[in-house]
Amino acid sequence: MSLVPLLDAQQAPLPAQEFYADGDPGPIVAALAHVPEVLEVTLPFLGVVLGPSALSLRTKEIVILRTSAVLACRYCVDTHTVAARDADLSVDEVRALRGEAEVAGAFPDPADRSLIGWVDAVALGPGTPPPEVAAAVSASVGEAALVELTLLTATTLLLNRFATSLGLPTSPETLRRLGEEGWR
Amino acid sequence: MSVAERIGPAIDAGRMSGRVWLYTNYHCNLACSYCLTSSAPKVDPRLLEPAAALRLAEEAADLGFRELGITGGEPFLLTWLPELLVDLAALLPVTVLSNGTLFTPKLVERLRALADLPVAIQISLDRPDPVANDAMRGPENFARVLAALPRLVEAGITVRLATTVELEEIGPGKTPEQERLCALHRSVGIGDDDHVIRPIVRRGRAATGGMGVPATRDDLEPELTVTADGAFWSPFAPTVTAGRLDTELLLTRTVVPLAKPASTRLRLFEGRPPGHDTTLGIR
């Protein structure tokens, strides 16, 4: 049960209405619509950070799903379990990212493991990530990629706390997929 | 180009209204059948504190707006309103809306300072007969308004009258009932230019009761309207239906600086198709 009413197209404030043009924009938009001036700048930002970029879709879904699992964000884990499968991550990989299996067993590539280690360190904190974790990820990605995937982790943290604190509901379509694919 | 540099030319070109409305409160001693804000004595007052109202008025003047409108709820329930009106009128001309039931001789004495200032009090009176009028606005409304009008006029205060009826009752000419109402306001020294007849708008309690004319964004003249809950498209926008604030005509939650919602309104207005606000006569 969401802590605030999710605004539908009929109640969406004027500056928010463009985000409803293609139908139900989802609960994050429907909640942010309460403060349209925030929605107007947040959505383009999220689109750039979470959307297609120089990082591969697979890398991005590893970061988002892992961060969400570490933060125990039910809404984001549900949503990105489906998104990760659509990004061609295997069932074993998704289970490991969700914390239901060992990472080492599901991700034989050291570069993937260093990435996940970085995400865990950034997400869990506190303080600066350990130097050996930073060194490992720096050895496998370039400087720009490190900046981007760190920002992606931080942005996912923001969304995790936002969605969890407000109790945003998983969409019916996501619930259907999770049920069909045996995740629930 | 700054917001202030854009507002003046937009007003001059008739692309936006020069008036900014402030909702000082939402509570009211009446509970009229068609009230947009579903106001009543015990509703959430949603107060716009006087210091906030004054700061907004200062910003409005600085941005190039030319008039202020004060509405509620019943603004004269607020003990600080007479002094606030004096301060606001030092910045911009003010029209304050009222149900006209609270103007005791004592309150009118406090309002005498308004006689020399650009302040008009617009009082609601819908029918020339107490029974028909009070059915919509509450017991004793007609008698109290009829007592208040000459008291205010005698004090030298500019008084206007607003009549709100169903759209079907507004024609090119006045109905016999409206003629009687006009005779009444003329008898206390209020001229025809200071009497507006407007339709009930189907929002708030009017929507719940199936009254009034439906009005969308394009039917409403865009006049920047600030409430404790945010800034809205028009004074007919921040309505309350079944206890919940209607948000579909919300511009921003940020009201200070006023340039923020003013800028959003300019942007949305510039993409606005021609509407029907003049044909429906909603004002």
Image (spheres, coloured by chain):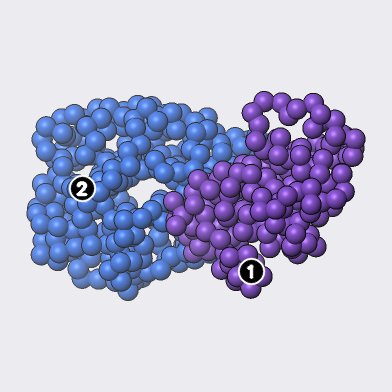
The quadrant of the image that shows the C terminus of chain B is bottom left
The residue beneath circle 1 is A182
Is A169 placed left or right of B160 in the picture? right
Q: Residue at x 58, y 65 (%)?
A: A184
Query: How far from the left and from the top, in percent, is residue B18?
Result: 49, 43
Q: Residue at x 78, y 60 (%)?
A: A89
Query: How far from the left and from the top, in percent, is residue B259?
Result: 56, 36
Is B33 placed left or right of A66 in the picture? left
Residue B9, labelled with which disc?
Answer: none
The residue beneath circle 2 is B42
Quarter of the view holding residue B55: top left
Q: Can I make out residue A129 in this image? A: yes
In the image, the chain rendered in blue is B
In the image, the chain rendered in purple is A
Q: Residue at x 11, y 61 (%)?
A: B130
Query: How far from the left and from the top, in percent, is residue A109?
Result: 87, 48
Residue sitting nearer the eye, B185 or B233: B233
Labels 1 and 2 touching (C-beta < 8 A): no
Does B54 appear above or below B189? above
Looking at the picture, do discs 1 and 2 lie on one chain? no
Quarter of the view holding residue A75: bottom right
Does B133 appear above or below B171? above
- Give the residue type at disc 1: Gly
* Element carrying mark 1: loop
Query: How far from the left and from the top, in percent, is residue B174?
Result: 28, 68
Is A165 placed left or right of A22 in the picture? left
Q: Can I make out residue A37 in this image? A: no
